[in-house]
Amino acid sequence: MTRTHVLTGAGSGIGLALARRLVERGDRLVLLARSDARAAELARTFPDAQLLVADLADPGTLNGVGRQVDGPVDSVLHVAGVVDLAPVERLRLAEWEEQVTVNLTAPAVLTRELLPHVRAARGTFVFVNSSAGLAASAEWSAYAASKFGLRAFADALRAEEVEHGVRVSTVYPSRTATPMQEKVHEQEGRTYDASRWISPETVVDTILHVVDLPADATIPDVTVRPVVPRSGT
């Protein structure tokens, strides 16, 4: 039976690797794109996917998205995210608002929109969080706050939906070799070496393990860390 997955962040990094794996195994994708131009780009990569145009930076555009999706949804995979580092003394309101909006508010609205479809499938919500959702470091206040909030949202959703057979999992990857991580290194003034960090495919393996669990079990939280210890440079 073909399974249906709604996915954010399919344009790069973990989301792109995950979308490719799901297509390879014959699953059906519903992808969110922030603009018509972005939807056209994704359509070239995933010609059989359903494309929904909605901007996570403007959560109001997500209102009504649920009506555009037909039938049960086996999983909603929240992968998209943004990050901008800054000490609190130089924290710009626009950067704070963007991170909280994209990383927390938009997933909450999208979850509400798709909840009836996931209930119908007794499906799974997966929130790709971050190690910053477990511990906050200097200059990570806005991003960590958004991810701590996302963790709380997932916990509340899990408690509410257990009676409907809906599973809710949060995946906490540490530093992963993605374009976002390259940007973080640039902001930190550090040399980027992708070989030191987790492969996106490894995180995808974890997500698929969570999604593919038999119906008698769930993994509420799972942390993925690199084997190589962090260097100071």
Image (cartoon, helix red, strand yellow):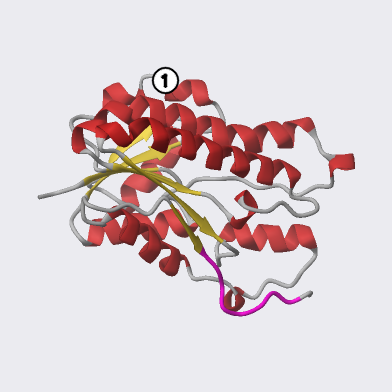
Side of 3 where 162 appears, left or right: right
Which image quadrant for residue 228? bottom right
Type of the residue with mark 1: Asn
- Say above or below: 13 vs 51: below
Q: Magenta segment, which residues?
A: 224-231
The residue closer to the viewer here, 155 or 37, is 155
* Quarter of the image where the C terminus is located: bottom right
Is-magenta flag for residue 225?
yes
**Residue at the outermost left position:** 1
Label 1 neighbourhood size at 10 Å, few (<14), some (14-19), many (20+)?
few
Instruction: Give percent across and percent down for residue 135.
Output: 68, 53
Query: Visible in this render: residue 55?
Result: no
Instruction: Give percent across and percent down for residue 115.
Output: 32, 29
- Who's the residue at 38% across and 58% down the image? 207
Instruction: Give percent across and percent down for residue 231.
Output: 73, 77
Which image quadrant for residue 137? bottom right
Query: Visible in this render: residue 63?
Result: yes
Q: Which residue is mark 1?
A: 63
Is most of the magenta stretch helix, strand or loop? loop
Side of 207 where 99 appears, left or right: right
- Say above or below: 96 vs 4: above
- Who's the residue at 28% across and 32% down the image? 163
